[in-house]
Amino acid sequence: MEDSDNADDEDGSMQNRAIVTPGELVTDDPVWMKGHGTYYLENRTYSSVAGTVSRVNRLLSVIPIRGRYQPETGDHIVGRITEVGQKRWKVDIGAKQDAVLMLGSVNLPGGVLRRKNEADELQMRNFLKEGDLLNAEVQSLFQDGSASLHTRSLKYGKLRDGVFLKVPSSLVVRSKYHSHELPGGVSVILGVNGYVWLRKTSDLQQQQSASHVGKDAAALSTRGNYSVGNASVTITRLEEESSWEIYSDVNDQISQSIRETITRYANCIKILAYCEIGITLERVTACYEASMAYDEAGKLIDREVMESIGDDVITAEKYRG
Amino acid sequence: MASPVVGKKRLSEGLTVTSKVFVRSRNGNASKIVREHYLRNDIPCLSRACQRCGELVAPDANGQLPKFILSPEPLQLKEVGRHYVVVDTNIILQAIDLLENNQIFFDVIVPQTVLDEVRNKSFPIYNRIRTLCQDNEKRFIVFHNEFCEETYVKRLDSESINDRNDRAIRQLCTWYQEHLQSSGINIVLVTNDRLNKESAVKNNITTKNLHEYVELHPNCSELRDLIPTEEFKQREKVEHFFENHYTTSRILGGLKNGTLYQGSVNISSYNFLEGEIKVASLPKPLLLIGSANLNRAFNGDQVVVELLPKSQWKKPSTMIIDDEKLNTNEDPNNEDTQISDRERRLLTQDAIDTQNDSSEVQPTGRVVGIVKRSWRLYVGQIVQNSVSKNTSNSAKSCFVKLMDRTLPRVRIRTRRANELLGQKIVVAIDSWPTTSNHPEGHFVKCLGESESVEAETEALLLEHDVEYRPFSKSVLDCLPPEGHDWVVPKDLEDAEVLRKDPLLPKRKDFRDKLVCSIDPPGCVDIDDALHAQQLPNGNWEVGVHIADVTHFVKPGTPLDAEGASRATSVYLVDKRIDMLPMLLGTDLCSLKPYVERFSFSCIWELDDDANIVNVEFNKSIIKSREAFSYEQAQLRIDDKSQQDDLTKGMRALLRLSKKLKQKRLDAGALNLASPEVKVHMDSETSDPGEVEIKKLFETNSLVEEFMLLANISVARKIYSEYPQTAMLRRHNSPPATNFEKLNDMLRVRKNMAISIESSKALADSLDRCVDPNDEYFNTLLRIMSTRAMTAAEYFSSGSYGYPEFRHYGLAVDIYTHFTSPIRRYCDVVAHRQLAGAIGYEPLDLGHRDKSKMETICKNLNKRHRNAQFAGRASIEYYVGQVMKNNESVETGYVIRVFSNGVVVLVPKFGVESLIKLDDLTSHVESVNFEEDKYQLTFTTQDGKHQRTVAVFDQVKVEVKSILDQSVGKRKAQLVLL
Amino acid sequence: MDGRRWNELRRFQCRINTHPNSADGSSFVEQGNSKVVCIVEGPMEPPSRSQLSATEATLNISLNVTPFSSIDRKRRNKNERRIQEIITSLKRTFEQSIITDKYPRTTISITCHVLTLDGGLISAVTNSITLALIDAGIAMYDYISSVSAGFYDNTPLLDLNQLEENDLSYLTIGIVGKSEKLALLILENKIPLDKLEGVLAIAVAGGHRIRDMMDKEVRRHGELRLSKLANK
């Protein structure tokens, strides 16, 4: 969440970071336009939430201290399918309403750019079914604030080989990249919506273009069922196979050590969330390092441990400047 | 049962909260209860000597500040100096009379701990101490030590609750001592508890026990006897006369599973060893026979009983048993079982008698626990024989025979037994241990010479629990400040007047109506006045105007509280105990002639046949033209020469009232009778002159009819407005069982019957029962029927369903009392409710609350009954005085026959008395009692004649008055001739 | 009485954001010995379409009075009439005060657990819901602070405990912010009309004090969050 850095300081009586609570008079000056978190009664603007006042030009809004994730275009998010519908999936992204993922905005096996046909519609459940997790990007916003997603990039798509975590969305700092590889063969997707996916760094990621042999029977059989109508010649077989793979339901073999590392990372993120520290790659890494002082990842959920590690991370950061 | 305090939390405003945790057992399960308990440091000490607490006071919800009551210059005594007194629970419980005494105990601090304990132990005493605390004269205060931070004490692990409370009291003493150190006032803790005293001394608290404290007073000798008996030293030979009562848990369990029954004991007035208890689940009352089964229960106690096996079921005894016959043992220090032997013999014989005829046996029971004692102050007299002749000045035991014959004698200890012989004294009962044959009590006060008018009057007032003390200052303060000069404002529009009484414009001005009042001669509290005038359409406008008492008696004032607690004025032969202060009753409220008065008017439009066309209620202003006595009114109506409008109106009223009466009788209203007599007083010597049966005029019935009409109309109105809480009066139809015996007597002796199916049937059948040879017989029968009736009672409409509102005697479906607010509190309530119903002023909360109304009704009923009893007792006393002077032979009627005596009623004096067989015959063996024929055959004293006496027989009796030495009560003695 | 003056509140304590990881908004309110936890989820996609309203948010309230909350352990039926009535009136109250048209096609689900009950059930629940909603960042017009008040003899009494509630007639009100507007008024038995005003007056005063205490807690919590956010 942004601080009210942009707050207009003209109004001297308003302290920059003052907290307003519902029902509190924000201003009685009618020149302000009322924005989010305010309401307007008899020429006066009141706050409707507890939060900080933000003033952008003439727009006055109150940003709640806590609240559900509000999607914005371009956000990299992690979501969970809640419903499979006609030509679309409904995705829980932790916002007020479920986001929509149109059939047209996913990569389908058989080529990125091919047209979606009726057969695809019938098979939607084969691609993504209820409960599946995926990472995606907010493509656009509807009138009522709900989001439309797309996964039209190889870095988006179905998630597996890992664990899911939920942190307050306000803690995930928007940045350029939200998908990171972490030391120890683990990668993380820090969804802007506060949903986090930790997984084994996949072989695919490691050797993007290398030939891949260890395909699962399931993937093959799925492909076998798939009657290719208009397979594009421009797409190599390898790409096609990997495309199919992105919808596989079966996890790779994950070694014990990687599992433990994932757990440790998961707990590290929980620590950051517990201490209400913004979650960034650097901090996760720093936290991970600090956590190495405890040999069992399970110990990390002790309150005292969490607090001490959280403090460590902050102080270390300050030390570095 | 408690183990308080988990932790303390400090709140911001100098408040601390702790929680009280205690374990309560309910139905055998223990449950833990946590309650919050707030401690504060801003509780004022309420001493006027204190400078600091003045700032602490906070107003209550009505914006009133607590008053500082404790005197800055309290009583100074030799050992303790200027001091305030702190009392503990037992002192209050035992010596409440002493605390109320006007010579001792000023500036008393009652700790809240103590108050709570008192409330748990005895609610009446709690009420008395509360009254004391509200009454500023004796300067009693309650200090809320449990809520004060400095005086709150935690219960320690090993401490019992009593020990904790004692410690809390000590803590309070210490606090006060420190608090008031600068003003040089000491604190004296008065306690009889030895352990408490010892600990208090350790904490440097001046402590006295009650004796020591009383001794400090210069006038201690008078007060000494008032100190209640302390626990007797254990006698060496502990003999148990009674079985222990069951434990509380056993009683509760038993009540729950239905093996035990609860009810209030009603001791037979002919046999003090036999009681009855009405149990809801059984059709017939349970009999409690013999002192062992009564097990220390007093008349009126709430007790728990257990059924006896069927083999022990009995018929109610037909024998008269009197305490004095049995109690041959007169040495109060020596408990002896002789008595019960004789008692037993009598009872066994009785049992054998009744066993033969098992059809009428009643279930019997025995008392296993006493829930609530009905103990109050009792009036009695010391039994002469029980006082030892030893004249040393030490306290001695003696017996007190109470006036109420249903009660056993009480043992008291006093130093002044010899002085008090022949005096009426008031005693309080302290306890009745199982080891004693008699309850233990202590002397409270002396009323004076037995048989003196003052002592007798006071005794009977006390005995009937009638409050007769003058009105307290706080009550009198509620009266209008103008006193007797108060007048109805001249100019009703005057701004000043309106400011004082904003409701004035709502009053109707009826000053032009020709109103008059008709009352008994010499009546000064005139409740009601009437008027009638013909309307243009030929109908009659009839108005009943009732004194507007509620204009002066506002709810919530001490005056109102006093009225509510007195509930009714009590009329004795020579004295009237007013419900409201004289100023109101006989002047400001009284609808005196020739002056303007506020009234509450009920105006009907009646057609020529006295049917109600319309009715209206208004607060009003009237001016009575004349106050008649019944006789005067009758003369005026009959006097043909009087043709003024007022007389015409009265004639119309009379005519209408006759129609009303006829309608009422047609509907089945009963015309019952009671042997009412009036005692004429010699105006000079105020000695009672002669006894006369009340005379009735037509005008009596005139007033009565319109009062009934007003009451009924008002009852309907308030019931429609307040269906849950309207103050009404009902009269249950008598239970058939009550008439069984009477009907049986009638059948056997006179071959007549009365029907009780409805009041109409009863009225008709009563009319039929006429003995041509004996014109009084019908009246006698009516008297006896009246006794078989249930008493009418006040109730609030929420307590019963509409069909049960019926007033049996008057044969109306709904009834209330509205017309005598000066002398009945019920009417005051009805007035307020009616004022609320017509939108005159909002009704006070207390009269809209069901439970509060029930409390009011309960008290009204009790007081009403007591007042009747007191009135009768007074008449009885005076009749006795009259008879003392003139013994005569009169006609009497036998109304009840026992195996060893008969009860005779003498209509001339309205007295009834028992004639014991022992006085009739010495040949006990020759007595033949035929129960089924209600007759008793015996040989007369001289042994010559055989004589038979039966119910309804007319007999000649010699009436004289004798003094019962032991009770000091003069009663009519009848001798059969 | 338990040592309070007629116009004193019981101990009031509240915390918000008690369950940060499992709910959008949560609160814990202690009013004397009554303790209530409230959890707010949403606004979110409704579990079933039928509840959906195209223009505003729908409110789901569930109230769980735990069997161990009162002195005698008795299991209460969730569908008990009284509970249902309370829920209905709470729903109406909060539908008014939440700016529901800001959240079309969503559901806000509110769950209250009464841990211990010592009088003031409705008021404690109302206060906890207000706090939890604020914690969830849901737009509301104003605080709804609630308190009960009763009437004994001639004295109005504020914030009754169970013992007092059992014997007295009392009402519970919900006040909108610092105003004297009532969002909720529940009177389960009778109070005479002419006394009502006095009772209401102290209840309003008490409600304002509760509002201030809640506001303080919200601000305290807000400061805390902001100071942590500074660490980003």
Image (tube, coloured by chain):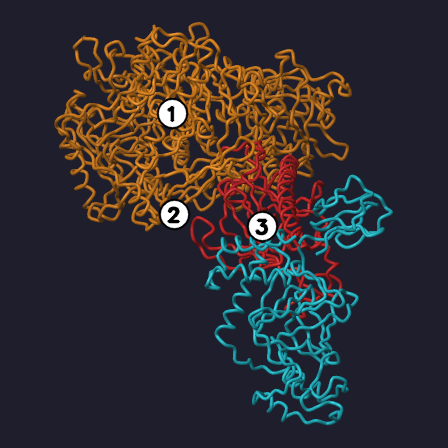
Chain colours: A cyan, B orange, C red
Give me the C-alpha separation between circle 2 and circle 3: 25 Å
From the viewer's side, name the closer residue of B793 and C125: C125
Mark 3 residue type: Val
On the rendered structure, is B299 left or right of B678?
A: left
Q: Are marks 2 and 1 in contact (CB under 8 Å)?
A: no
Q: Position of residue C139 (x, y in %)?
A: 71, 54
Q: Quadrant of the N terminus of chain B?
A: top left
Q: Quadrant of residue A136?
A: bottom right
From the viewer's side, name the closer residue of B366 and B5: B5
Which residue corresponds to the image point at 36% horizontal and 29% vertical from the top-left? Answer: B165
Q: Which residue is mark 2?
A: B31
Q: Quadrant of residue B739?
A: top left
For label 3, the SS is helix
- Crowding around mark 2 (Cα neighbors within 10 Å: few <14, some 14 to 19, many 20+) is some
Mark nearer the viewer, 2 or 3: 3
Q: Which residue is mark 1?
A: B169
Q: Which chain does the numbered disc 1 sit on? A: B
Which residue corresponds to the image point at 28% horizontal and 21% vertical from the top-left? Answer: B198
Seen as rendered, the residue at the extreme front is: A320
Question: B380 above or below C43?
Answer: above
For label 2, the SS is strand
Q: Which residue is mark 3?
A: C125
On the rendered structure, is B938 left or right of A160?
A: left
